[in-house]
Image: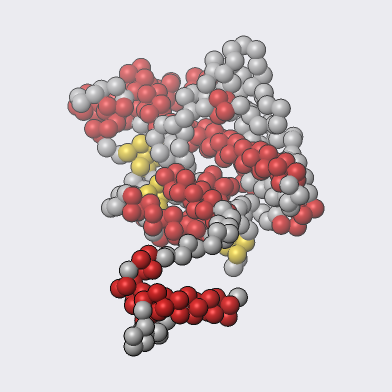
Amino acid sequence: MTSGNAGALPAPLTPADCNLQDFAFMPLDVARLRDSDMAAYESPEACWAAVLLWSAAWHQVPAASLPDDDRFLAKAAGYGRVVKEWLNVREGALHGWIKCDDGRLYHPVVAEKALESWKAKVHHAWKKECDRIRKSNKQREAEGRSLLPLPPEPGSHSDNIPLESGGIPPESAGHSDGNEKTDDGIPPENALKGQGQGEGQGQGELKPKSSSPQPPTPDAAQAAPESSADLVGGMARNVQIALLLRAQGVITTAQNPIVAVTWALNPKVTDEVLNVAIIKAKAAKPDQTIPVAYLAPIVEQELQVQAAPPPAPSTQKPREDWAWRKSNQGIDTKGRELGMFARSGESYPDFLARIDTELEKRKGRAA
């Protein structure tokens, strides 16, 4: 394992929110492993422990990292609670790992594969958002409303998107080249979950993306941002959102698909909407950290509330309360409300008639 002085530790090799726990398959570069120094010089026990550590790191968050804790490492490497036995193979099993300034251990090769899959995941989220907007635009067009803009392809992920067979195999066995798409151009969901037989064109192989998103309509093009997020005050919108959330204890980064795609590209997701959602989330989970995934449905609810039309004014006339007419006390009370009092010797039916006349006059003036 490579380490350095505290002030010289490198930055983490994967984003803080890099989560591949829904990727059941981890790419393995066969030739790279076979010809590695670890395979040549380390003991079989250390090599097997190393493979188990890679597998454990794949499903950690951030992916490709492990906590620098021998109790955890011993368990992940297959030694359970027998830390003493783990220490015998520790150096060989941690071959190539480096400690970063977040205090965690990272493996550069596992991180390389994790970033490829993470890019594919972000890109897939963008394509799903495009598909959702296209479906919405069909309804808006039928209603004669202006069309929503298609979000631009995320700039940092637009080139060399990994093939689904490159570490993310499709579900069908033996009948696929790893590039299936549905009719609307969206890759099947199971492809991004790594469900398959592991057949493909080689682990880690990359090909430039040939297709491009549908061009937006003229109205949409005018409203579309120039980059993956509108620049406000010289700062990308996704960065603004991430700073706002992190300042209030929400766990996220600017590269999170929810922040970078779903929210940053939606002008309706304002700071006010986010602040209201955060208040509601903290009320539901007091004294607990708020992941951005927990906040997302609350933001969606706030957007739906804002989009709901105001209630139509009631056409029913308010019902008049005639209970006061049934008693002498009620007639006296109604008269006082109108500034009227019974005259000396006046009967209650006569006083009631005068009250009715006054009410009719006031209705006429109000009309």
User: In the image shown, does 113 or 145 lie closer to the viewer?
Assistant: 145
State the residue at coordinates (71%, 57%): 223
Q: Residue furthest bottom?
A: 344
Instruction: Provide residue 229's location: percent of width, then percent of height.
Output: 62, 55
The answer to whether residue 95 is left or right of residue 176 is left
User: In the image shown, does 203 or 31 lie closer to the viewer?
Assistant: 203
By what rule are the colours in the image chosen?
secondary structure
User: In the image shown, does 295 or 348 lie closer to the viewer?
Assistant: 348
The answer to whether residue 57 is left or right of residue 159 is left
The answer to whether residue 72 is left or right of residue 196 is left
Instruction: Provide residue 105's location: percent of width, then percent of height.
Output: 37, 39
Check the picture and name the quadrant holding the C terminus. bottom right
State the residue at coordinates (40%, 74%): 349
Q: Residue furthest right?
A: 218
106 over 244 or under it: above or below: above
Query: Quadrant location of residue 222?
Result: bottom right
244 over 118 or under it: above or below: below
Instruction: Provide residue 144's location: percent of width, then percent of height.
Output: 76, 49
State the residue at coordinates (58%, 59%): 315
Instruction: Provide residue 224's location: percent of width, then percent of height.
Output: 70, 54
